[in-house]
Image: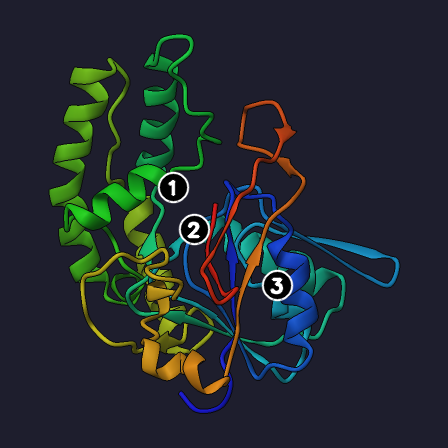
Amino acid sequence: MKGRTDIVLGVQWGDEGKGRVVDVLAARAGVVVRYQGGANAGHTVIVGNEKYVFHLLPSGILYPGKTCVIGNGVVLDPETLFGELDDLASRGKRLARLVVSHGTHIVMPYHKMIDRLAEGARCEGTKIGTTGRGIGPCYADKYERIGIRAEDLVNPEILKGKLERTLKIKNDILTKIYGADGVVFTDKAEKDLKKIHELGKDGLLICMAKTQASISDDASKKGRPTGFKLTVREVRLSAGAGFIIPITGAIMTMPGLPKRPAACSIDVDAQGKVTGLF
């Protein structure tokens, strides 16, 4: 990648206001990348008198002429993605070009089921406050190498084979651990897969963005978004080519838990350089 690369990092548990900052920075950027997370609480952007809430789309989507990328570190819920795109289309908005990495993992219905059942099974005081949108279980499948990726959505035979193998595992979890009903691969689902394949061939569903292939931490490592496979050399912070922008707020929030004041400490070395933010 050439040119300056700025990285926006939330340093709490979400709700820091990252989306608003990205929206401002996107005005002078050519490419806006979301590199981790899923369709959780989302970003709120206000343009004029209109309010937009994006759970999955990158905040720069409202800038025509830009390119927005959903990176391989994101877990993508197709239902949410298409819902947001349909909403923007109904409001007559011209959008940025949207690109989805071939390696982006897909949130499936059984992820949401397991997420809610697991939270419900936790004792009082041990609940984690999940929103039940399947994000955690989808990441778990990614690291177990049994997940469904974006590239599988346009390869129906590969997708069907993966689903048949994965559903055996998921149905054991649903029925034997949680006592719930299993998930069945129906004829309707097969027809839907063929429809997705046709959309993919026409370029209407997904545009594959090939990124460097590696298995690494996809959130952030040493201040860089590995969910989009940027290297330290490409960011080139030492040359002043870009900035890491940490976002924090006076109030900390976690899904399902009450708000509370933020506690923040900054480590500074002998030369007055900030070395850590906690």
Q: Where 40 sits versus 34, above or below?
A: above
Q: Where 190 sits versus 125, above or below?
A: below
Reading the image, the residue beneath label 1 is 135
Q: Are marks 3 and 1 in contact (CB under 8 Å)?
A: no
Q: Residue at 34% across / 61% down in the picture?
A: 222
Q: Quadrant of residue 209?
A: bottom left
Reading the image, the residue beneath label 3 is 59
Q: Tag 3, which secondary structure?
A: helix
Reading the image, the residue beneath label 2 is 37
Residue type indicated by callout 2: Gly
Q: Are marks 1 and 2 in contact (CB under 8 Å)?
A: yes
Separation of marks 1 and 2 at Cα, in angstroms: 8 Å
Q: Earlier in the sequence, mark 1 or mark 2?
A: 2
Q: Is residue 187 in view from this perspective?
A: no
Separation of marks 2 and 3 at Cα, in angstroms: 14 Å
Q: Where 154 sits versus 212, above or below?
A: above
